[in-house]
Structure formats: C-alpha cells, structure tokens
Image: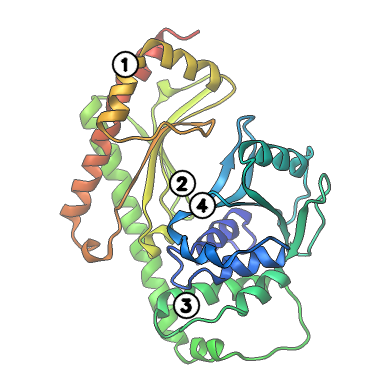
Amino acid sequence: MFNKSFHEDAISDYLAYILNPKVNGIGIEPLKNLIMAANGKWQDAFGEIVDEISITREYAFNNGRRIDLLIQIGDQMIVGIEHKVFSQEHNNQTRDYKQKIEAQFPDHEHTFIFLSPDKRQALAHQAFRAIGYEDLVNLLKQVNFDYLKNIKKTMLYQDFITHLEANFMKDETYTISEKTSLYLEHFRMIQDLRNNFEHDYKRVHDFIMNFLKNNIENNTKMEWIINANPDRGYQQISKTSWKTKGLDIHFEIKLSKEKFASHSPIEFMIDIEGAKKQLFTEHLLQMYPSDITQFVEQNNLNRSERSRTFVAKEYELFQIDHLDDQDVLKGKLEHMIKDFTGFVKVIDDALLRFS
C-alpha cells in the first residue's frame, strides 16, 4: 500500500482512514486513543455518535491555508492535526490554525496535535501537542478488536503500523505479536492479494478517468485533459481555456486506493484555484446566480465553504456488491457527469467576460 515510503501525503491519507470509525473496520478506539494521548477531553458518548464524526484531509481555511487533518465529532469536539515528516513548521502555521479553528468552531472542545516521526514540538503555538510516530504506533497497537472478523482491513491496519516501524523507528528489541504471527503465516497470500489489488485498482482508476473524460467531451463537444496518478488521492480533468493566468479551474475527483478498498463515498467537485480565484468566483456568482442556484438545487449539490471548491457532491461508486458490474459503474459515472456539466457553459461564458 505504501509505495512511497516517506510520502507525507500518503501517510496522512491512510491515517485519516484508520482514524475513521465509519470505514476502518476497527472501530472508534484508534481515534479515542489518539485524542487521549494528546490530553483531549474524550467522552464515552462519542462512541454513540459515530455517524456524526467527519475527517477532512487538507481542510482549507478562508485564507487559503490548509491543515493536514481536521476531525469533527458532532457539535462537541474539533481535532486539528498538522503532520510533518521532514520539513519544519513555517510561517506560524500552528498559531494560525489554532486561531482559525477556534474562530470557526467556538462552541466545540479543541484538541491540537503536531505529528512527526521524532516528536518535534510545534514552533508557533504550544497548544499543539507533540505526538511522535512511536507514540502513534503504541496507541494503535493498544486497540483491541477481532482481527479475524475482517482480515483485509486488519492487514491494512497492520501494514500502516509496520510501515512506520520499518521506515521511521529504530528499536534494538522486538516482540512478535499475535497479529504479526498471523501476518507471517499468511504472508504469501497477502502479497498475492496486495499485488492483485494494486493491479486491479489501476485498471479501475484508468477506466473511471477515461470514461469521465470521454463523456464530458461528448456532452460539451470540447477536448479535455486528464491530470491523474493512481498513487495519489485526487485526480483532475480540465481544458486549456480553464487554465489562464491567475486561474486553474478543473473537475476533481477524490479517487484513491484507500477509498476503493474501504468502499468509501467518492467526492466529485469543481475547484477554482489560483491567485484570482476569489475575484472569479464572485464574478461567476454575479453573472449566473439563478443558473447556479438551479443546478445546485436540482442535482443536490453542495456549495462548499472551502475556498477552492465551488460545488461538490459525494457518490457511492464502490459498493462491494456491484464492483464487477461495469454497467452499474458506468451508470453512476454518467449520473455524476450529468449533475455537473451544466456548469461548463456558465464557466466558459464567465471566463470570456472576466478580466
């Protein structure tokens, strides 16, 4: 799962997955243990509101800065996690993140975590509790669950722990856990499963991206360009006229191996980035207020508060009972494209009148 051993984004992506009790197959204990390790005020009642727990990667504030993970537990707690593998904090990040979170979520409890391999301290604000990879591995190992109940997710969980230990932690002693013994006993089968998973995911990824591109082109009668990599968590489709000086507009789909493996919902969106994103967004809303409202309401889209996302919606693409049925997947992708293609004309027209 971890082709890029030291890739900060890959570790953060998978941490978001294993902390999410709705998808990890493990439960709420990984999140609970991390919050308690950071001296957060954990409440047993949190275990009863799992459906109200959301984890956002690269959460964007209104000044364009992004904290690596933001976890919201109902209307009670916000956990902000800044993750640094090799780089140091810069430009007073933690101070800025703390101020933004407290201003945006004033009625929540706040827990701030600065995660790094060697347990470095946050430079700008000590409210961020330093957590090292050794701390993280230990608290993950303390989680109790039936590892035979869902072997696939258990192995993904163990794979993450093994990755951190192998690449970032040095220990002159060792112990073999029951879970590791199970892993070793079935190692060849696991390797074969992983290799097949990697191969099949790339095929699914390429199928989805090419299908989206071809259908958008058929619907708009224009040529589009794919910017995709199966080893990252986001993929983009755009066209030359949407990338101008100060603007980068594109369709983006949050497609990743972790979402494929966990059958998680996939978010599709229109992103507006670049130095002129705020000016163009205001220009677009002024020119086409009724059209945009109609598109959003008719297709149940979300007008995101994130500074770079204009509209977004989640889709259930990877239910396990129909992964092998390409016709079902095609139908879902066609529906997704139909929800968004109305924006193409208004964006094109707005760009022509934007200076």
Q: Which of the two discs, 2 and 3, sits closer to the camera?
A: 3
Q: Do the residues labelled 1 and 2 touch (CB within 8 Å)?
A: no
State the CA–CA distance, disc 1 to disc 3: 49 Å
The secondary element bearing badge 2 is classed as loop
Q: Name the residue under label 2.
A: 234
| Residue 183 horizontal side relative to residue 115, left or right | left
Q: Which of the two discs, 4 and 3, sits closer to the camera?
A: 4
- Categorize mark 2 by other alpha carbons within 10 Å: few (<14), some (14-19), many (20+): some
Which numbered dot is residue 154? 3
Indicate the amino acid at tag 2: Tyr
Above or below: residue 201 compared with residue 180:
above
State the CA–CA distance, disc 2 to disc 3: 25 Å
Which numbered dot is residue 74? 4
Residue 83 picture quarter: bottom right
Q: Name the residue under label 1.
A: 290
Whole-percent x and y of residue 164?
Answer: 65, 70
